[in-house]
Image (cartoon, grey):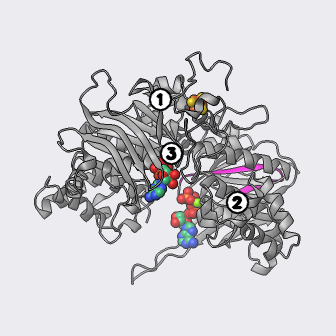
Amino acid sequence: MGAVSARPDPPPAVLDVAGLSVRTGDHALVEDVSFHLGAGERVGLIGESGSGKSLTALAIMGLLPDELSASGHIRLREVERDLLSASETERSTLRGDRLGMVFQEPMTALNPLMRVGAQVAEVLRIHGAVSGREAATDRARDLLAAVELPDPERIARRYPHQLSGGQRQRVMLAMALANGPDLLICDEPTTALDVTVQAQMLKLIDDGVAARDSALLFISHDLAVVATVCDRILVMYGGRIVEAGPTRALLTRPRHPYTEGLMAASDLEAVDAAGRLPTIAGSVPPDGRFPDGCVFRNRCPRGDDACQAWPGWTGEQHDGVACWYPSGSGREAGRG
Amino acid sequence: MVEPTPSTATAAQPGPAPHRGEPIYTVRGLTCRFRQPRVSLRRPTPPLTAIEGIDLDVHAGQRFGVVGESGSGKSTLLRCLAALQAPTSGSIRFRGQELAGRRDRELKFLRREVQLVFQDPMASLDPRMRVRDLIAEPLVAQRMGGVDERVGELLDAVGLARQSATRYPHQFSGGQRQRIAIARALAVRPTVLLADEPVSALDVSVRAQILNLLAELVERYDLTLVFVSHDLAVVRHVCDAVAVMRAGAVVESGSAERVSSAPQHPYTRALVAAVPTLRRALAGADPAALLGAAPTDEEPT
Ligand SMILES: Nc1ncnc2c1ncn2[C@@H]1O[C@H](COP(=O)(O)OP(=O)(O)OP(=O)(O)O)[C@@H](O)[C@H]1O
Ligand SMILES: Nc1ncnc2c1ncn2[C@@H]1O[C@H](COP(=O)(O)OP(=O)(O)O)[C@@H](O)[C@H]1O
Ligand code: SF4
Ligand SMILES: [Mg+2]
Ligand SMILES: [Mg+2]
């Protein structure tokens, strides 16, 4: 699925990522990642912690830390320049205007010394969507009301630390959606929230992108959450996209052993005779060093010598798998 | 001997799952209030009631779940059970001995019987200490001998290599750090393990590994487990009995199976509906469906 591979004409993409790699000095953390998002499309990016999901999001936002370098192509609709070669000034104009992002830990994105209403108003004024202090303040209050914060007048005058975790997430969502972005990226937006607050947040994200026809890239390790929100899913492991497909097909007929492992581990009702939950063998290498060839081969129940070479991508960019022995191909018979 | 578990909410409920012996904990009318900073010169701010009027029994060998949303008082209840927090009123009897109103040094016996595991292993493990010392600390505090042998045994029990002993917490993944925290809790051979959201910060795959480990250890060491979570689906998998908390009170209790499959209280129903499941998502449920009868957000003061 490299940058040059031929594929049938996709719908005009809001975002087109082609052959994206992110490297530290000596090894790749994200490698040859390609996908696209159409207008209003909701796409999930799933995988365990350490798979490269956040780095992919940060590369799109132009927020990678200095010690990492990105290569490949990232194109945004109606923007001439490849985002990876755009200047920091160009990229910061796109952020908050055409691109919005909600982080797992809201305190990293909010200014602790500024009242939250003023922070939302600032996003509106910097990007020229609203002129005048008063108009921006009014509009900020409307946005806080739209994310269903109770008593938005009062909340607007508070500092981030005076809000609960769920309230801070909503403020960040209000900021990310303020200028009607073409693309909203949510990186584990509800992982730190309890189930009832998560339900409210998911509904707000869903309504927010629908009202603006924004594309959504929704990152999570929770399959059930992604399935509830997204039309399509990308499965990431070891810095690679290992499977992609429409939500229902991918989750009813997974092909990659990693997708199957994630599904089995998330089903709390599927226990063996001893009452044990299925797990994926081993764990994600904490230092980000995955095996050569197929990145999953040291944990895969199905791997053999062939898997010492990277299997390459089979199928369409938006519906395919990277595995020598995918389920349903006939080739997996007798393995795993 | 078989006394019904009191329920503050609904009277006509089936009791909890059949239990296997005398209650280890008998909690009656447990209330815990916190003073709040004064914001007005004219009148004092009323104290915040974290939990109020809680009645429950935890039996030996039971796996007892506590579920509820953020701020409902789950951790406060657990801290009271561990005698890390003194209740404002009410009674907590541990194997018949009253804990409320006792001085710290009279509670030493409890530190050996009852241990805690927290949600965020990174926050609960001192980053400057090696794994060996982290696990040995409770042993040393209790003046127990044979430390190195015991640390080795514990690392085996939680599925970590013995060489891990010389490393620091940041050199481990989230799941491995939770294994270290569990080894540390088990060091003094407690009879009761109190776990506060031990898997809420973990990936689904790691969550399954830690839940399996907890189940195995509870079985092997014959532990009584009190397990706090905001996710009723996890509690149903782990526990045999459950108490559902809201705003400091128990609104429903019973067998974990019954409470999840046939919730009686509207709040429990909302909690059940709010957990996204693959089955419902594939049947076409969207984020709005999760709200079900979810109670509206209450502004904390
Ligand atoms: N030491 C304290 N001083 C003042 N208030 C406290 C203290 N500890 C807890 N509270 C308050 O008591 C209430 C219950 O808190 P608790 O931590 O028990 O909730 P919880 O159910 O564990 O929530 P979470 O799911 O967020 O962990 C909250 O309103 C909390 O802010
Ligand atoms: N600044 C950095 N320098 C070196 N390695 C990093 C840096 N940021 C992330 N990594 C590594 O890259 C891998 C992928 O990280 P990340 O994208 O955060 O994963 P995810 O979001 O899927 O949990 C991990 O092994 C992580 O340790
Ligand atoms: S390529 Fe081989 S090791 Fe990799 S997932 Fe497929 S079967 Fe497993
Ligand atoms: Mg991440
Ligand atoms: Mg708590």
Residue that mark 2 sits on: B180
Asked if marks 1 and 2 touch (Cβ < 8 Å), the reply is: no
**Position in image of residue B207 (x %, y %):** 63, 46
- How many residues crowd mark 2 within 10 Å: few (<14), some (14–19), many (20+)? many
Q: Which residues are magenta?
A: B55-69
Which of the chains bears the disc numbered 1?
A: A
- Which residue is denoted by mark 1 in the rendering? A312
Is label 3 within 8 A of ligand 2 (CB to nearest ligand atom)?
yes
The three-letter code of the residue at mark 2 reads Ile
Please tell me whether residue A233 is drawn above or below residue B213 in the rendered image: above
Residue A188 pos. (x, y %): 45, 48
Residue appearing at x 82%, y 74% in the figure: B142
Which of the chains bears the disc numbered 2? Answer: B
* In this picture, residue A183 sits left or right of residue B148: left
Q: Is residue B288 magenta?
A: no
Position of B255 relative to B92 (above/below): above
Label number found at residue A130: none
User: Tag 3's secondary structure?
Assistant: loop
Q: Quadrant of residue A210?
A: top left
The quarter of the rendered structure image containing the C terminus of chain B is: bottom left
Quickly name the residue at label 3: A51
Residue at disc 1, CB closer than 8 Å to ligand 3: no
Viewer-side label of 3, 1: 1
Q: Secondary structure at mark 2?
A: helix
* Left or right for B234, reference A179: right
